[in-house]
Amino acid sequence: MTHIPGIVITGASGRMGQMLIKTVTDSDQARLVGVVERKGHDWIGQDVGKAMGGQAVGVTVTDDPLEAFSQAQAVIDFTAPEATLEFAALAAQARCVHVIGTTGMSDEQIAALEPASRHAVIVRAGNMSLGVNLLVQLTKKVAAALDEDFDIEVIEGHHHHKVDAPSGTALMLGEAAAEGRGVNLADVSDRGRDGITGARKRGDIGFHAIRGGDIVGEHDVLFAAPGERIVLRHLATDRAIFARGALKAALWGQGKAPGQYDMVDVLGL
């Protein structure tokens, strides 16, 4: 019988955590072997299925990530930057594939993942969906084909609970546009306009964040020139797409050499 990888979900009580738990428990390709929450959380010690308001699934919520990781082949992590760095070190110690969907990480925090990636597989992406990663590739190609007569603006929308802006996906798209043009995003990024800002600087890549209601995720990349506009768009209506992508990444990482990967690698794009 083929071995079915065991998966641990961190941040179990969050909306993505609960969606990931459901996705793994519904899958015939993986099994849920652990769920982790922060110390002092009400769910600690409870069966996670009951904590979520359903039937028992035989997995108890713990605040000891290393113990949970030691029983698993992969960890799926959509938490916060500081927690993700801690989990990366522990996942590397346990030799687990670490799938990171955490957004809002600084360049320094991303660089801090390097030691863990020497010992384990890390798959990190600002967005785990197939459609978004296709959009990233299209953005790069369109940016490479058009000159600076076309202004580039990235417009993203999310629910009112989201704490970081621009979104990780928006930054992925901005990076793709910058790469297509052969420039560094840090040199051309324009993330805020208020008051008398003066004319738009040629070659800049602008970002705009919308927050409201229960928007799951909407991303537009606008290429605007005199007389014409091109808009590349992705609309997410169900966060299950991110959970399915994360599980795909966790399965793909089994048996791969230690290192840092992204969803372009997972999807073969």
Image (cartoon, rainbow, N blue to C red):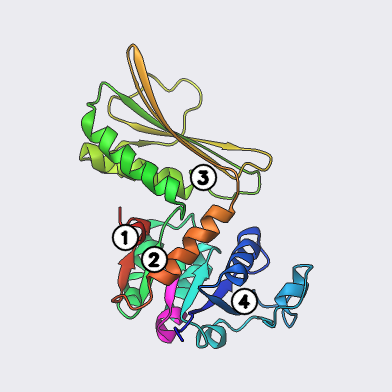
Query: How many numbered discs?
Result: 4
For label 4, count other residues whose C-alpha is less than 10 Å away and answer few (under 14), some (14-19) or many (20+). Answer: many
Say which residue appears at 70% left-offset and 78% top-offset. Answer: 57
Question: Circle 3: is it few (<14), some (14-19), or many (20+) Cα within 10 Å?
Answer: many
According to the picture, the residue beneath numbered tag 1 turns out to be 265
| Residue 239, placed above or below residue 177 | below
Which amino acid, by three-letter code, is at mark 4? Val
Binning the other alpha carbons within 10 Å of mark 1 as few (below 14), some (14 to 19) or many (20 upward) gives: few
User: First in sequence: mark 2 or mark 4?
Assistant: 4
Horizontal side of residue 62 vs 257, given as left or right: right
- Ranked by sequence position, the earlier of labels 1 and 4 is 4
Q: Earlier in the sequence, mark 3 or mark 4?
A: 4
Q: Which residue is mark 2?
A: 123
- Identify the residue position indicated by label 4 in the image: 35
Disc on res. 120: none
Give the magenta-colored segment's residue range.
Answer: 90-98
Which dot marks residue 165?
A: 3
